[in-house]
Amino acid sequence: MDSSARTRVPSGRRNGQELRAYARERLIESRLTPNAISIAGLVGNLIAAFLVTQRLFFLAGVAFVLGSVMDTLDGRYSRMSGKGTLFGAFLDSTLDRIEEGIVLAAVAGYFAATGHDFAAAMCVVAVLGSLMVSYTRARAEALGVECKVGLATRPVRVVILSIGLVFAKGAGLGDFELLAPAVYVIAALTIVTTIQRVWHVRVQLSKEPNGPPEL
């Protein structure tokens, strides 16, 4: 490789870094706030829930993905920009729970309307399980225990439900019906993850002088 080829690569990387730094600075200087991104995520999930009620599953999946991406970005933008507040962190966590519940409630309504009672019931289990996954982490951290164990983290649940929506029956992407299986998987994984987190916290607290009593 000649010297000109060797110098072109670092230059390209440097230009890319400068471009990202410039975009980051402009974004930080803008009036955009983490709370605004959180609200945008809520709107995206409300649209997804409405589209589910209209049985436009592919579009619902797209809206759900976009809304969930906003949920991911708000925390990162908060840390990057220094615009985060305690209330913003509280709002973000609260809206995350609402958004997931809204979409799954819409899915449950669809299953109930089409006579799929078991699938509708599993939506309820999935919502409860998702809430418990979040609650166990929050309660553990309030006790001073880091608790990120388990498979059914929010990103994983988002991916599974997105696949279910995009490949739901009538979504237009082949003759698939993955919505009900996606709900079943979320319900099962959230139950397992909740149990994992309870056991993890018990083990961690047992290492303390006044650990939990034996079961």
Image (spheres, rainbow, N blue to C red):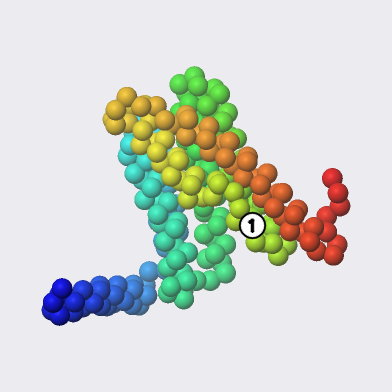
Residue topped by disc 1: 147
Count of labels in the image = 1
Q: Position of residue 178 (x, y in %)?
A: 42, 30
Indicate the secondary structure of the residue bearing disc 1: loop
The C terminus: image quadrant: top right
Query: Residue drawn at (43%, 31%), measured in percent from left and top?
Result: 179
Q: Name, please, the residue furthest toward the front.
A: 1
Residue type marked 1? Cys
* Residue 130 makes an appearance in the image: yes
Is residue 168 placed above or below 202 in the rendered structure? above
Is residue 159 placed above or below 15 in the rendered structure? above
Is residue 146 placed above or below 114 in the rendered structure? below
The N terminus: image quadrant: bottom left
Q: Position of residue 2 (x, y in %)?
A: 13, 77
Q: Quadrant of residue 144?
A: bottom right
* Residue 19 makes an appearance in the image: no
Camera-side residue of 173 and 59: 173
Q: Quadrant of residue 34?
A: bottom left
Q: Quadrant of residue 18?
A: bottom left
Camera-side residue of 150 and 31: 150
Q: Position of residue 156 (x, y in %)?
A: 48, 47
Q: Position of residue 45 (x, y in %)?
A: 42, 47
